[in-house]
Amino acid sequence: MAQTLTKGQMEAEISKLLIRFEKEHIGRGPEGARSYIVADMAVVRLRGVLTPAERHLARDPNGSALIREMRLRLVEGSKALLEAWVQDLTGCRVLNLLTDVSTRTGEHILVFVFDQNLEDSFKDRKGESG
Amino acid sequence: MSEDEIDLQAAIAELVERFEMQEMGIRPTSVNVMVRGDVVIVHLKEVLPAAEKHLALTERGQDLVSRFATMLFRGGAQPSVEQLIARAMDKRVLDVQTAISPLTGSIVAMFELGEKSSE
């Protein structure tokens, strides 16, 4: 797929894939998603990942710590699946997946590190908008 | 079981289902409530999403999912499920314990009641 899409289209596809993952596996879809391909990485920002109950619980420090632990463990547990999906989409092997959640802003950041420079593969493409 | 007790169980089932839908964004397949003396048992069927079921396959993961569910019942809304049950039963809730099933995705929560609420 990396051969047929522009960089912007690929970023949109990555966002869609992460929204699907959150909905189908975490059980709660985010309010929005933006993805950025930078060199050998894809950075994904998911907005509004916390449910109303989690937002309420996050006001308490213990609740906030538990939500963060839970979210990170859920992604860790589904890492193999998520990496396989991203690999199928981008055609790049995922070497590492780094992730964190802010219970203050309800934002979830994921960074996929690839085995090659994905951004470079779009540079010579005619009509590439960046 | 008296009609009042049946009505009470139905009312608690409704408020727990509303919490799951409005505050967690999940619709359980069914919510059954049993009130026996000073204990309220709530059984929510098929309420865990795939990633939570997967996480709960290990003992440590199961403990985390269970603690998370308990904490949401205690403080995941204002008023919380715990407070709503206390109000419905007109008794204090002394403790909440939650067991989860990674196989069926169900949650069983037990609310242990104490003396009459002073509210």
Image (cartoon, coloured by chain):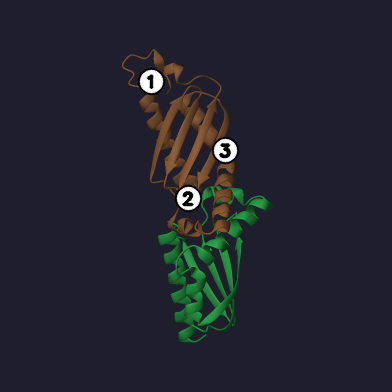
Chain colours: A brown, B green
Q: Is residue B37 above or below residue A74?
A: below
The residue positioned farthest toward the right in the image shown: B59
Q: Position of residue A40 (x, y in %)?
A: 51, 23
Q: Nearer the viewer, mark 1 or mark 3?
A: 3
Which residue in the structure is indicated by mark 2? A104
* Total number of numbered discs in the rendering: 3
Secondary structure under the numbered disc 1 in the rendered image? loop
Q: Position of residue B46 (x, y in %)?
A: 51, 58
Contact (Cβ within 8 Å) of mark 1 with mark 3:
no
Judging from the image, mark 3 belongs to the subunit labelled A
| Disc ID at residue B49 | none
| Disc ID at residue A79 | 3
Judging from the image, mark 2 belongs to the subunit labelled A
Judging from the image, mark 1 belongs to the subunit labelled A
User: Going by the image, does B116 lie left or right of B28?
Assistant: right
- Earlier in the chain: of badge 2 and badge 3, it is 3
Identify which residue is drawn at 45% across, 17% down.
Answer: A120
- Earlier in the chain: of badge 1 and badge 3, it is 1
Q: CA distance from mark 1 to mark 3?
A: 26 Å
Q: Is residue B60 above or below residue B96?
A: above
Which residue in the structure is indicated by mark 1? A4
Task: Please state which amino acid type lies under the numbered disc 2.
Answer: Arg
Q: Is residue A9 visible?
A: yes
Counting other residues with Cα less than 10 Å from the Cα at mark 1, is it few (<14), some (14-19), or many (20 or more)?
A: few
